[in-house]
Image (cartoon, helix red, strand yellow):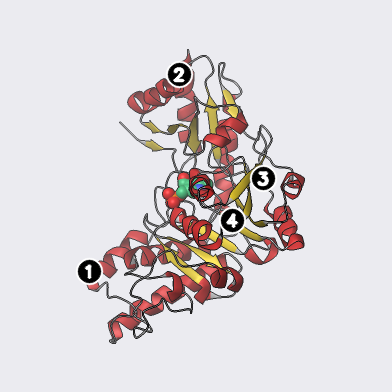
Amino acid sequence: MRRIYFDNSSTSFSKAPGVSDDMKRMMDLGAFNINRGGYEEAYHVAAQVLETRQLLCQFFDFEKPKNVVFTPNITTSLNHLIKGFLRPGDHVITSSMEHNAVIRPLVQMEKQGVTFDAAQCNSDGTLDPQKVEDLIRPNTKAVIVTAASNVCGTFLPLKEIGQICQNHGLAFIVDSAQKAGTFPISMHDLHIDALCFTGHKGLLGPQGIGGMLLTDRMAHETVPLVAGGTGSASHLEEMPQFMPDRFEAGTMNLPGVIGLRAALQYLDSKAPGEIAAHELDLAMAMHDGLTHLRGVRAVGLDTRQNRAAIVSVDFPDDDNARIAFELEQNYGILTRVGLHCAPRAHQTLGTYPEGTVRFSFGWNNTREEVQFCLDALEKILA
Ligand SMILES: Cc1ncc(COP(=O)(O)O)c(C=O)c1O
């Protein structure tokens, strides 16, 4: 049976052309450690790693490649910041659409005396930025929000929130997991102090590589969570203060960086907005097709603007898990059902605790696949 992958919000598939080739070449020809070997082969890898930092700067409109830190994924980046930047007594503002990658570390930090409030989003996932400003207290230190909901794709108003942070001297930390790669994000224009990314979703790279881009203030004020060898300043028993070594103890996922580099080069070769336009065409075709089916409730925005290509659906008269199961078993359509690690988002959207069936589209999905899925749903619901 043919398989149709509509779970790109979980991880993108296919990866960008060139990713697996470059990773294989590196593993075959020599995955030499950077900062550890004083020979040409290691310098060559170091140059590619630096190039990847530069590409990320270009991508996120940021000027300091040395302040690009690699981590295994965005969850690790967010943990670094939430646990290393916040101190007992600090207050944080987040939103009611967050992934557990933000909420769980914040809840852990509550035990250390950090408090947080979640600005309440509307039932389509949109947020009135004034709600963020209303929550500011004298001890508020940071605002941490997702760029786009992983449940329904709705964008949060980063520009307005960034301006509020700027006006009040708050650090602005962004979870770019569902927006990066497909949609532009300018750290400069949005006044972002820490941009966390994961390489394996819209950036079309492999799993196991992510990171964060930090302003000097964030880099300086965040205590490194992990200490160890960096291959630099080895006479010191403390972590080096300079970037990116300050946050990069231990051997890095170099094949992952090389794969990410290939993915970034591919994205760079595309016309701006080309992938987003294609994915949104598919999402809107899905959305429109669903309106002709009975017993279906799509949540989130019903317009093309301010959203990623995610369509999340509740089947009020049916069992969502059964629908997802039938889609897979009988039609080979792969989706994700449940709460998508974002229970508060489902509370906001009115789909808690049952969750939704999530269809998330990628750069190499087609209109024909969407139509096949709509036909399958019609038959399942009949
Ligand atoms: C909005 C959001 N934040 C964070 C994450 C966590 O990503 P990772 O598992 O790559 O750390 C996800 C993944 O689904 C996400 O959608």
| Label 4: element kind | strand
Q: Is residue 300 above or below residue 142?
A: above
Q: Nearer the viewer, residue 141 or 121?
A: 141
Identified at 52% across, 14% down, the residue is: 317
> Which is nearer the N-term, disc 2 or disc 3?
3
Amino acid carrying label 4: it is Val
Q: Quadrant of residue 29?
A: bottom left
| Label 3: element kind | loop
User: Disc 1, disc 3: CB below 8 Å?
Assistant: no
Q: Is residue 352 left or right of residue 47?
A: right
Q: Nearer the viewer, residue 41 or 34?
A: 34
Give the residue pinned by disc 2: 319
Identified at 60% across, 36% down, the residue is: 284
Amino acid carrying label 2: it is Asp
Nearer to us of marks 1 and 4 is 4
> Which is nearer the N-term, disc 1 or disc 4?
1
Give the residue pinned by disc 3: 306
Q: Is residue 21 above or below residue 374?
A: below
Task: Give how far apart the Cα atoms at labels 1 and 4 are.
Answer: 36 Å
Q: Is mark 3 within 8 Å of ligand 1?
A: no
Give the residue pinned by disc 1: 28
Identified at 49% across, 67% down, the residue is: 223
Percent coordinates x, y for residue 39 in the rendering? 28, 86
Percent coordinates x, y for residue 159 in the rendering? 71, 55
Nearer to us of marks 2 and 4 is 4
Task: Give how far apart the Cα atoms at labels 2 and 4 are.
Answer: 34 Å
Is any part of residue 351 visible from this angle? yes
Percent coordinates x, y for residue 122 in the rendering? 69, 35
